[in-house]
């Protein structure tokens, strides 16, 4: 049915994609469905939006630097923040906060700032989503700043905290084609806290025809760290203001558990399940000749391409421009770089301009130093009808020894106007990636 729909509507405006705004509530895990329904802020929070505006994203960055005591300009050895460690409060010193306290919004003024437009616009005049990922990452940290209140911090002392991104949950996009020359608004608030971890929900909207239209919504999990990022730091508890907030908060623990389960179920940790074993055997049969038993001889069926011929690679030196205050690379920069190479890989594979549909959960397990060489490799690991699933691996390389360590794996789903060439694995390793790609694809599209 999906195929016939696509066949009949080979025009961008008409292709209906399945995203979280269109799925019936029952198809989405309960705690995430709640965010689907509330992908605008709860009513009482929205009403206070005007009072909570933070200006432009440039002002947000300046505000954060001021609170942290950071000065513009690069220093290979960042100024020590050791002296701030003594101001770190204990959990019991921190008063509870409401979701409303951290609710804020900021503007990317694309309609008026023409030099900013150059950074955000694509060849066709749309917005570069990679840039928005960078902004969302910074903005999530800003919401954490808004949440944090330290009653015993002496006047004039800088914030003895650091925030790093632990992970970003699945991001889905609406069908609004965002322009690179109209203002974009980010809004968000803290939606759950642990002891030192903070979940932040961030929305993106763009002014279309005089009113804001939703572009996307993402959940960021941030870690509060001490002044010099050597240990966890406690955060203010979250006190729900009403029934609606109580439900959001209760879902937070549930979401944390689900993330752990998803992580533990990775194909890189546990063996494929029974239906997947069947798929693997079918792949083996389809790619093995029937007239010879010659070892490792494989045949490529018509309209298919080997996975080993379906990747793009790029080695990126990172620069201080992409640093946080510990000379580590911003998560947003990694997300943008991975998205852009994934998009190129999808475009070159499909031979037509693909549309980004979903970004799967992304975790940041190891910090990346700002003088690193980052090797990004985007593989087409799974295809279905007009969809391409990309898996992009980020490796940090040591220039002296040539050794490399994988710091992140990103999964992006793109759609093409046409049915795409089927990608097939040739080796057992590739088959595992195919299965992982299929899982990510199925999860991002929801049950059929
Ligand atoms: C002068 C320069 C100007 C430049 C301009 C500056 C502008 C000024 C603004 C800066 C604003 C920055 C905003 C961007 C922020 C980034 O983009 S940071 C860069 C990307 N992220 C990273 O590099 C993080 C890399 N990962 C890590 O360092 C470590 O894995 C982490 C996240 C610190 C966790 O380490 P850990 O040893 O597991 O820590 P641990 O203490 O055991 O756990 C801490 C908490 O995290 C939770 N947690 C840890 N792992 C997980 C997981 N996988 N799943 C769920 N929860 C987890 C734990 O459950 C625990 O929670 P609580 O129970 O306390 O609530």
Image: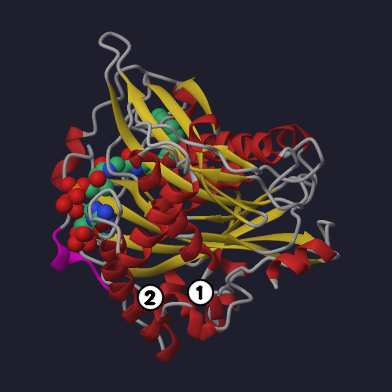
Secondary structure found at label 2: loop
**Left or right, 38 with reference to 178:** left
Q: Position of residue 140 (x, y in %)?
A: 45, 54
Q: Position of residue 154 (x, y in %)?
A: 25, 51
On the image, which quarter does residue 162 sit in?
top left
The N terminus sits in image quarter:
bottom right
Label at residue 447: 1
Name the residue tied to disc 2: 98
Q: Residues within 10 Å of mark 2 (few under 14, many from 20)?
A: many
Q: Position of residue 147 (x, y in %)?
A: 37, 63
Residue at the spot 67% in from the left edge and 55% down from the top edge: 386
Q: How is the image coloured?
A: secondary structure
The answer to whether the residues at label 1 and label 2 have Cβ atoms under 8 Å apart is: no
Q: Position of residue 289 (x, y in %)?
A: 48, 40
Rounded to the nearest whole Å, what is the CA distance between mark 1 and mark 2? 35 Å
The C terminus sits in image quarter:
bottom right
Q: Which residues are magenta?
A: 90-96
Residue at the spot 33% in from the left edge and 26% down from the top edge: 369
**Left or right, 61 with reference to 258:** right
Is residue 234 visible in this depiction of the protein?
no
Is residue 448 visible in this depiction of the protein?
yes
Residue 95 among those drawn in magenta: yes
Residue 433 among those drawn in magenta: no
Vertical position of residue 429 compared to residue 136: above or below: above
Ligand 1 within 8 angstroms of badge 1 C-beta: no
């Amino acid at each position: 049915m999906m195929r016939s729909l696509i066949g009949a509507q080979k025009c961008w405006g008409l292709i209906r994609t399945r995203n979280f705004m269109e799925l019936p509530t029952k198809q989405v895990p309960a705690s995430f469905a709640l965010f689907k329904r509330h992908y605008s802020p709860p009513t009482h929070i929205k009403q206070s939006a005007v009072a909570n505006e933070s200006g432009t994203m440039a002002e947000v960055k300046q505000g954060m630097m001021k609170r942290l005591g950071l000065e513009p300009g690069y220093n290979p050895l960042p100024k020590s923040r050791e002296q701030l460690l003594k101001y770190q409060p204990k959990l019991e010193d921190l008063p509870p906060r409401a979701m409303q306290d951290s609710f804020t919004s900021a503007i990317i003024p694309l309609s008026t700032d023409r030099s900013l437009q150059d950074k955000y616009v694509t060849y066709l005049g749309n917005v570069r989503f990679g840039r928005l990922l960078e902004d969302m990452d910074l903005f999530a940290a800003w919401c954490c700043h808004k949440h944090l209140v330290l009653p015993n911090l002496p006047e004039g002392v800088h914030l003895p905290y650091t925030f790093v991104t632990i992970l970003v949950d699945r991001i889905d996009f609406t069908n609004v084609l965002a322009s690179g020359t109209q203002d974009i608004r980010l809004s968000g608030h803290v939606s759950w806290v642990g002891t030192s971890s903070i979940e932040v929900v961030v929305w993106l909207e763009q002014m279309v025809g005089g009113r804001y239209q939703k572009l996307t919504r993402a959940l960021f999990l941030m870690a509060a760290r001490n002044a010099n990022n050597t240990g966890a730091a406690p955060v203010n508890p979250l006190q729900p203001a009403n029934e609606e907030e109580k439900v959001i908060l209760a879902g937070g623990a549930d979401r944390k558990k689900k993330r752990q389960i998803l992580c533990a179920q990775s194909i890189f940790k546990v063996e494929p399940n029974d239906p997947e074993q069947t798929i693997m055997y079918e792949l083996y049969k389809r790619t093995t000749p029937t007239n010879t038993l010659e070892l490792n001889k494989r045949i490529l069926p018509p309209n298919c391409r080997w996975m080993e011929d379906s990747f793009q690679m790029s080695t990126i030196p990172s620069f201080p421009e992409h640093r946080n205050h510990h000379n580590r690379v911003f998560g947003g920069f990694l997300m943008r770089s991975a998205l852009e190479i994934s998009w190129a890989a999808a475009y070159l594979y499909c031979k037509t301009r693909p549309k980004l549909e979903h970004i799967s959960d992304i975790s940041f397990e190891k910090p990346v130093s700002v003088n690193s060489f980052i090797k990004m490799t985007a593989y087409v690991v799974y295809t279905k009808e007009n969809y391409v699933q990309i898996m992009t691996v980020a490796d940090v390389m040591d220039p002296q020894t040539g050794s490399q360590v994988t710091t992140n794996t990103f999964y992006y789903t793109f759609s093409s106007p046409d049915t795409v060439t089927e990608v097939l694995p040739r080796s057992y390793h590739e088959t595992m990636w195919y299965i992982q790609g299929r899982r990510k694809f199925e999860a991002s599209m929801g049950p059929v």
